[in-house]
């Protein structure tokens, strides 16, 4: 069975620059290995989910610019459903410069896109009714043009009884408190890093579990922790060579959602998520450098042959 996942917002163009070393030196030309434009943000999640065999549908907006149309073409080629992605006239796309060096260091700088306020449409609810789960990102709520529509759609998904997965992200603290509260109240499952936990909720995991059923703490190479009201399970990571961590958390999330919807149980889903993230960090770049199902299987075969994808 192919699960249908609806993602809300966070459509981004990543300009990937792979260089021999960081930091770059002012006043000196430095040769890059390559420069590419790729879908970033939710694009990593969408591509990974599609490659794992899920039907991925995106809701939101891209700019009516070269970046926006390039990202849309790439996502469509990966099988992502973009029927509900708008390109309003004279708008720009959220764009992130991602610079990665041969030692695995990555730095980012970006600017949010501009455009008129995007309103929720009846077709969005139709998509929710056909979905098995909804995934949203805190970055979406930083885009003022879509924040209200995203929050309303999250609340509608919850009302329909859909599993809602939410990744607050490192900028969540910049969202107004009312918006934060609305988003967190909708989330059945929260995914965030240890650093983000400290800024998302002063009360830590126990406070988050008052409204959410599951809290996933992403710990990079160390793996992850899965918290429920019954306790915590630690899922160790995999000792792979990390060449680029950009987008790894998005790919991790796709693996976790796939495992949960497949009825694997939280511990096995966490192992798949770790394997998906480990497969990603071995590749430089985002978007089309998301892992394939075969690459995830290779990680599992090398380190956890008891689990098959």
Image (cartoon, rainbow, N blue to C red):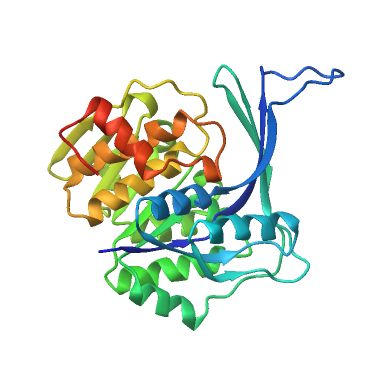
Question: Quadrant where the C terminus lies?
Answer: top left
- Farthest residue toward the right? 27
Position above or below: 159 against 283 = below
Question: In the rendered view, does 3 fall on the left or right side of 106?
Answer: left
Quarter of the rendering containing residue 200: top left
Task: Residue at 15% x, 38% y: name it.
Answer: 231
Residue 14 in percent (x, y) is at 63, 44
- Farthest residue toward the left? 230
Position above or below: 91 against 123 = above
* Residue 120 seen by the camera: yes
Task: Residue at 22% x, 40% y: name it.
Answer: 227
- Farthest residue toward the bottom? 122
Question: Quadrant where the N terminus lies?
Answer: bottom left
Question: In the rendered view, does 35 fall on the left or right side of 260?
Answer: right
Residue 134 in percent (x, y) is at 37, 62
Quarter of the rendering containing residue 68: bottom right
134, 239: nearer the viewer: 239
Residue 122 in percent (x, y) is at 48, 83
132, 174: nearer the viewer: 132
* Residue 201 seen by the camera: no
Task: Residue at 34% x, 75% y: name it.
Answer: 130
Residue 243 in percent (x, y) is at 51, 24
Question: In the rendered view, does 261 fall on the left or right side of 153?
Answer: left
Q: How many marks?
A: 0
Quarter of the rendering containing residue 67: bottom right
């Amino acid at each position: 069975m192919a699960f249908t996942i609806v993602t809300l917002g966070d459509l981004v163009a990543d300009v990937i620059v792979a260089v021999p070393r960081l930091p770059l030196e002012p006043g000196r030309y430095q040769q890059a290995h390559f420069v590419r434009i790729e879908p970033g943000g939710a694009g990593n999640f969408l591509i990974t989910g599609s490659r794992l065999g899920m039907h991925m549908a995106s809701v939101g907006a891209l700019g009516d610019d070269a970046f926006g149309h390039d990202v849309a073409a790439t996502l469509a080629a990966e099988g992502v459903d973009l029927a509900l992605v708008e390109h309003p006239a004279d708008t720009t796309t959220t764009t992130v410069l991602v610079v990665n060096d041969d030692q695995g260091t990555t730095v980012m700088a970006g600017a949010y896109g501009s455009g008129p306020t995007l309103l929720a449409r009846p077709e969005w609810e139709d998509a929710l009714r056909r979905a098995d789960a909804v995934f949203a990102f805190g970055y979406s709520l930083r885009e003022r043009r879509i924040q209200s529509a995203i929050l309303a759609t999250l609340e509608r998904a919850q009302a329909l009884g859909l599993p809602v997965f939410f990744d607050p992200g490192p900028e969540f603290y910049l969202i107004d408190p009312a918006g934060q509260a609305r988003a967190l109240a909708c989330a059945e499952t929260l995914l965030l890093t240890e650093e983000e936990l400290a800024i998302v909720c002063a009360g830590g995991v126990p406070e988050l579990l008052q409204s959410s059923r599951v809290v996933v703490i992403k710990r990079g190479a160390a793996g992850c922790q899965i918290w429920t009201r019954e306790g915590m399970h630690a899922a160790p990571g995999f000792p792979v060579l990390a060449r680029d961590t950009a987008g790894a958390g998005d790919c991790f999330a796709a693996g976790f959602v796939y495992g949960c919807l497949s009825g694997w149980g939280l511990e096995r889903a966490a192992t798949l998520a770790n394997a998906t993230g480990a497969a990603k960090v071995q590749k430089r770049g985002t978007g089309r450098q998301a892992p394939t199902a075969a690459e995830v299987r290779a990680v599992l075969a090398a380190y956890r042959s008891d689990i098959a994808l």
